[in-house]
Image (cartoon, rainbow, N blue to C red):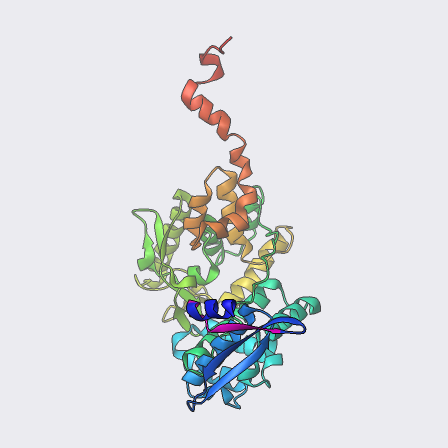
Amino acid sequence: MARERHAARSGEGIYPYETRQGTRYYFKYRKSDGRSATRRGFASPRAARRERERVVVSAAIGGQTSSTETFGEFFDAWLQNRRPYLEPGTHSDYEVHGRKRLANFRPIKLTKLSTPAVEAWLAQSVDEGRYAPKTINNALAALVACLNDACRKGKLARNPAAGVQRLPATHVERDYLRLDEIPRYLDACMPIYRPLAELLIATGMRISEAIALTWHDVDFENSAVRVLRSGKADGDGSTKGDRYRSVDFGPRAGGVLRDLKARQQEHDGAAEHGPVFARTVGGRLSAPPKRMDRNTVTRSWHKSALQDAGLRDMPLHSLRHTAAAAWLTTGKPLMYVQRQLGHASITTTEHCYGHLETSFLKSAAAETEVAIWGTPESRAVPG
């Protein structure tokens, strides 16, 4: 009784009682029609609290959790309503998650989804080995977002996927061109592709960002390009994470861009707001100028350059890794790499490229001593 009185005073509303099997717990609540009810048989106060929270919220929203709506029905309606707020690529990813990776949940009633069911799905997805951990985590993120909306609309008392732990990130060894391989690759590029390849390696930009550049985005005076948009299949969209940034380039890349612009203006009168990397028809810019096709760059020009240079196969995105590796190899700090690549957090940069930073860390202590004390030849070592 003392424990019961303490629980009542604490405001938790969870009460113990004794059984042959030991202490059990119960709580009282009011149904949506106002009648009093009791739930008993919980092995711990925590289990009783969780169930109390669920039924109290359910009663407060008028028993809406008794709906026969399936998860698949709700997901499809949710995704349709989210279309105006999502990038086309994100909407497409969510659609695939809902149709394929979350397919097991589709026939289940929305109110029957549980945390153990989501955890079992996660474990099964890992065991099957069909999807990478990152893909499974992305599907889980889509599930959480969808069920958050169900909670907001009063169809669920709590989100059963919200507390499910994500899979740990796995280290992926990212291939890239070594310093001595970069000239070989560029020399093997087709003339129409080489300026783009030069800029990708010099700046670490994503291909979607580079093909969306206009001449107005290039700041020759400050040797930088403004990354403001990303090229999508149906037009321009926002950059990854909706983050704008300025990316530096060196004198060589600046010369490549100036030469490209001069040639466009000489032969075609390239507009200031026209694409930097434009398609050509019969050796001349298309009219009106249109940006290069991403698929052609990725599947044709890049692969041909690798083959003609006698280099191993690697995706076009490896040129972004090539830029990061080149900066770190030549002594640039991770903070510089983060800002150039546009990572939201230095943690992402550390995870991807931290192992490459050791090339300049090894000499850091010696260089610091030289800065303080001078070269060994110019100072006497204490006896």
Quadrant in the picture for residue 287: bottom left
Quadrant in the picture for residue 115: bottom right
Can residue 71 be seen from the camera position used here?
no
Of 143 and 66, which appears nearest the observer?
66
Q: What percent of the width, then of the height, locates residue 167?
A: 59, 62
Residue at 58% in and 83% down: 106
Q: What percent of the width, then of the height, locates residue 98?
A: 55, 78
Residue at 39% in and 69% down: 236
Of 341 and 16, which appears nearest the observer?
16
Q: Left or right: 356 with respect to 77? A: right
Residue ranking furthest to the top: 383
Total numbered labels placed on residues in the image: 0
The verdict on residue 170 being magenta is: no
Q: What percent of the width, then of the height, locates residue 228?
A: 35, 61
Quadrant in the picture for residue 22: bottom right
Q: What percent of the width, then of the height, locates residue 46?
A: 54, 68
Q: Left or right: 190 with respect to 22? A: left
Residue at 48% in and 80% down: 28
Up/down of 243 relative to 94, above or below: above
Residue ranking furthest to the front: 1
Of 101 and 33, which appears nearest the observer?
33
Q: Which residues lie in the magenta part?
A: 10-18
Can residue 1 be seen from the camera position used here?
yes
Up/down of 373 relative to 306, above or below: above
Up/down of 131 relative to 66, above or below: above
Q: Left or right: 203 with respect to 19? A: left
